Amino acid sequence: MWIDDDQCYQALRTRDVRFDGRFFVAVSSTGVYCRPVCPARLPKRENCRFFASAAAAESEGYRPCLRCRPELAPGDASVDANRRLARQAAEYLDAGAGDGESLAALAERLGVTDRHLRRVFHSEFGVAPVEYVQTRRLLLARRLLRDTGLTITEVALAAGFNSLRRFNTLFRGRYGQPPSAWRRAASGRRTSDGELVFHLSYRPPFDWEALRDFLAARAIPGVEGMERGQYRRTALIRRGGNVHRGWLTVAPGPRNGLTVTLSESLAPVVPEVLVRLRRLFDLDAQPALVAQRLGSLAAARPGLRVPGAFDGFEAAVRAVLGQQITVKAARTLAGRVAASLGEPLDTPFEDLTTTFPEAAVVAAAEAETLGLLGIIRARVKAIQALAAACAEDPMLLSPAADVERTLTELKALPGIGDWTAQYLAMRALSWPDAFPAADLGVLKALGETSAVAVRRRAEAWRPWRAYAVMHLWFGGQENKTP
């Protein structure tokens, strides 16, 4: 995947935002590594070394820049098989979902040998998974110390360290000072109500209005809402046998980013919340590469993103409910499911009242209970089969899952055809090449009547066909899809 070093230096010279997060530059004369958009004075070419990840730079002894803050860089969406495998593993590790799990167990979960996983991971990030995890935790800790008012103990736990002593030792060893010294030099942000505020970066252009409208039209009553351009929702995250519930808001922010506010109750699961929000808003997209492939199709809205899912199971239920009915009707039914089977939650917002039910709860519900909500029998059967599958395998609808295997498993369930499976690959799996060829909006936008003909035309858009779908929908057909 490596970009030519001369190209990297040119991107650094021009502070090219297209390369932000795709590489990091370390400066031998200062011992510091930066993002390519760093506002600091341009270093001499002979003093620069380029790394594929922050972890690789830190493994060579470089410290993160205090001005551009490498921990805020956007990620890198990928479609190549080996790169995607490495990114799947990284996303799983970033979210902290694999805390305490061996690499062999993670490899088995991803359907490969641990040796192969180590090899492709090192090829992608320049370090072994254990080094990657340690660096990501330390960078998150720096971020929490600087950007929140969490105590040092809370920071250590939220960043994934089970021992405060080990956290202090690793932090001091890596950065030459204890966490307390970094905290004193920073201005932590914690509102009077204990809320936590974060900045999530993206590569411009970013079509916030289109994404806002898409999510607003599909917001599940009681669970999600959009008010004055601010997206907000409730959240339920299970971690290590514990359930964490709370609320969050997202709005446009400064410096090519979004401003995220979390309730204090979500502090223990900050890493997973931020990873989920990056997926939901497709913040790791590479607009320049997408536009290059899609050509004139993307010209009108070059910053259009593919909305992901904050929770894969929630998105899947919403998709099944939306089969052959309007967006508004599906939204109403999803709200009834949340109100009937979800748990009430106190929030500062009148429209946020409950968390969406977990898969196990929906699977265990009486079919009659769902039927009384206005859901037809075939949909009830499909939703409960899907819920049982997700309860058995929580990674089934996660971007860390194998795409082809997941598509096969989904289509083996009752009521899940190719259209629904591909739609979920777009949103729940964040697969940039997903393509629901039989979608009515796509067919109409292309003036075709056959899914076979649509697939043939879409070959030119690989590996970004999911973005092509969004552009076709926003050509006037988006409200025909769930």
Image (cartoon, grey):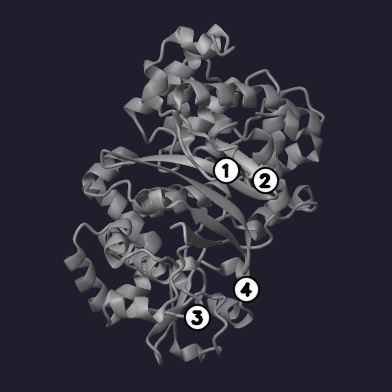
* Label 1 – label 4 distance at C-alpha: 39 Å
| Label 1 CA crowd tier, 10 Å (few <14, some 14–19, many 20+) | few
Q: Earlier in the sequence, mark 3 or mark 1?
A: 3
Q: Which mark is residue 67?
A: 3
Which quarter of the picture shows residue 184? Answer: bottom left
> Which residue lies under the disc numbered 4?
16
**Height in image: 452 above or below 16?**
above
| Label 2 CA crowd tier, 10 Å (few <14, some 14–19, many 20+) | few
Labels 3, 1: front one = 1
Q: Position of residue 73 (x, y in %)?
A: 50, 66
Disc 2, disc 1: CB below 8 Å? yes
Q: Earlier in the sequence, mark 2 or mark 1?
A: 2
| Label 4 CA crowd tier, 10 Å (few <14, some 14–19, many 20+) | some
Q: Earlier in the sequence, mark 4 or mark 2?
A: 4
> Which residue lies under the disc numbered 1?
349
Labels 2, 3: front one = 2
Q: Amino acid at mark 1?
A: Phe
> Which residue lies under the disc numbered 2?
227
